[in-house]
Amino acid sequence: MHRLQLIIEAATENGQPTGFWGRVTFEDNLLIEQADTVEVLQANMRQLLFDFHDLEAVEFELAYDLHAFFEQYDYLKISKIAHFAGMNPSLLRHYKSQTKYPSAEQVQRIETAVHQLASELSQVHLVAA
């Protein structure tokens, strides 16, 4: 099994989302693909890796840019993630819309906040009323 990082960016046309771009590097080769969904993007990348490198067993570690992350997980509240990250929500909205671009440190703060939120949610237990 090969574990490769698939870097995902949102594709846009005239400011409107049109899917996702993805890139994988394997043996000094950069493979790039576009698809409507992340799931199709992964399938297309697996096919490219098979076609060019005869790789059959591939597992991807997904790495999103912020714009793609918020497109893929559009149900998340930006204000809540900003709160967990100790950031101004309007700044995070700028990052999402790509009118401003975060530093590597800011991206790390946002990723930590997302992981913290996910950790909290994983502790939730629901019961029928």
Image (cartoon, helix red, strand yellow):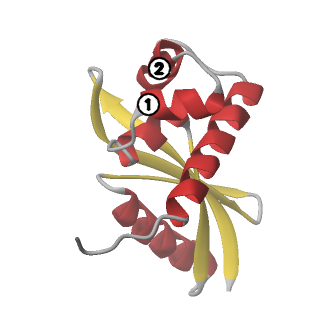
**For the residue marked with disc 1, what is the amino acid?**
Ile
- In the image, which disc is placed on residue 127? none
| Residue 9 percent across, percent down from the top left | 49, 41
Whole-percent x and y of residue 41? 41, 60
Asked if residue 31 can be seen in this view, the reply is no
Residue type marked 2:
Gln
Q: Residue furthest front?
A: 129
Q: Identify the element where label 2 is drawn.
A: loop
Residue at image mark 2: 98
The answer to which quarter of the image holds residue 79 is top left
**Horizontal relation, residue 9 to residue 105: left or right:** left
Q: Which residue is drawn at 56% across and 72% down?
A: 49
Using the numbered discs, state the Cα–Cα distance from disc 1 to disc 2 in whole angstroms: 14 Å
Q: Please name the residue shown 69% across and 74% down the image.
A: 3
Question: Of marks 1 and 2, which one's residue comes earlier in the chain?
Answer: 1
Q: Which of 48 and 69 is in front in this view?
A: 69
Residue at (50%, 58%) from the top-left corner?
A: 121
Q: Please state, as top left, top right, bottom left or bottom right, where the C terminus lies in the image.
A: bottom left
Q: Residue 78 carries which label?
A: 1
Q: Nearer the viewer, residue 74 or 19?
A: 74
Looking at this view, is 14 or 26 the one in front? 14
Q: Residues within 10 Å of mark 1 (few under 14, many from 20)?
A: some
The percent coordinates of residue 84 (x first, y second) are 60, 34
- Tell me if residue 31 comes above or below residue 20 in the rendering: below
